[in-house]
Image (spheres, rainbow, N blue to C red):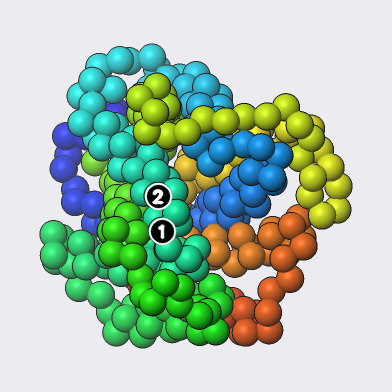
Amino acid sequence: MRDEIASSGPTVDSVEAPGDDVRRGLLFALTSAVSFGLAGTMAAGLYTAGWSAGAAVAARIAIAAIVLIGPGMRAIDGRISVLVRNGRTILVYGVLAVTGSQLCYFYAVARLPVGVALLIEYTAPVAVVGWMWATHSQRPTRATVVGALIAAVGLVLLLDLIGAEPKGGGLDPIGVLWALGAMVGAAAYFVMSADTTTGLPPITLASSGLVVGAVVLGVAAVTGLLPMDASGADVAFEPFTVPWWVPVLLLGLVSAALAYVSGIEAGRRLGSRLASFVALIEVVAATAFAWWLLGQVPLAIQFVGAAILLAGVVVVRLGEPDRA
């Protein structure tokens, strides 16, 4: 059956789903966005306890890969031939969508303010719209364009970039290139997650991509490209202190395993364009988690930005036809 799906050849985002399926897709997209949004706060807690960013990312990807590899293989009845046939897709997904975006963002924030790096990375939905228009002749509707502009304004306010003072007299061009690399990785994630032509179930694509990501990060660690420092100290959050393994497991199980699987499920139901815009809610979720667990109280303008961003996502949703 999956072989038939793989050989039938519909283009990405060309298959429409019933209204109920779209509603389920929105639920999956929200689940993915909130799950991804937890990652920054968990990682920040680990950093204060002595972990390096590389170690936190590696643990996150490795745990998710271990947890999902069994279910991923069961979803294809253990047929290795399915993985071999889609080897190129899995490799690109693992390198770009799983590992590339995270490593590029890691290097971007070493040279740029976090808000600027995030803003550049989160232009990914615009890149997705352009890609689908150029490669699949899916011209965006007027509502999609208007919604994208509204969401962009909300994102700028939510990241509090208006009042941020530039440091060092301007943006580091190398940092901008790293941030653009993160954007390409994020865009690849949305486009490839929505592809229904491969015959790979969502959990299989997620698990195999995470395995590739774990291998890439392992090589980066061995070669010294990615510093790996871990600590067994407790991790202190604003409301409570927990053992180190609690945020590590949450990073792997929630912000990686659950986030990637639900994100792929969302892309299959909503298409890459709409799924990528709903994913912007990750920034809202990240702000909320940082407020609760790190005591980082948002400014009033950030609340306004969150509301505007959500309004933009709603407008994009109204401009995107249901997939049937």
When asked about the image quadrant of residue 229, the answer is: top right
Q: Nearer the viewer, mark 1 or mark 2?
A: 1
- Image coords of residue 183 (percent x, y): 33, 58
Residue sitting at the far right: 240
- Left or right? Give the position of 117 relative to 321: right
The C terminus sits in image quarter: bottom left
- Left or right? Give the position of 132 relative to 208: left
Above or below, 172 relative to 31: below
When asked about the image quadrant of residue 295, the answer is: bottom right
Dot 2 surroundings within 10 Å: few (below 14), some, or many (20 or more)?
many
Q: Are marks 1 and 2 in contact (CB under 8 Å)?
A: yes
Give amino acid for label 2.
Tyr
Give amino acid for label 1.
Arg
- What residue is disc 2 on? 107
Give the total number of marks visible in the rendering: 2
Label 1 to label 2, Cα distance in Å?
7 Å
Who's the residue at 39% across and 44% down the image? 103
Q: Nearer the viewer, residue 49 or 35?
A: 49
Who's the residue at 20% across and 24% down the image? 85
Q: Nearer the viewer, residue 24 or 124?
A: 124
- Image coords of residue 306 (percent x, y): 59, 76
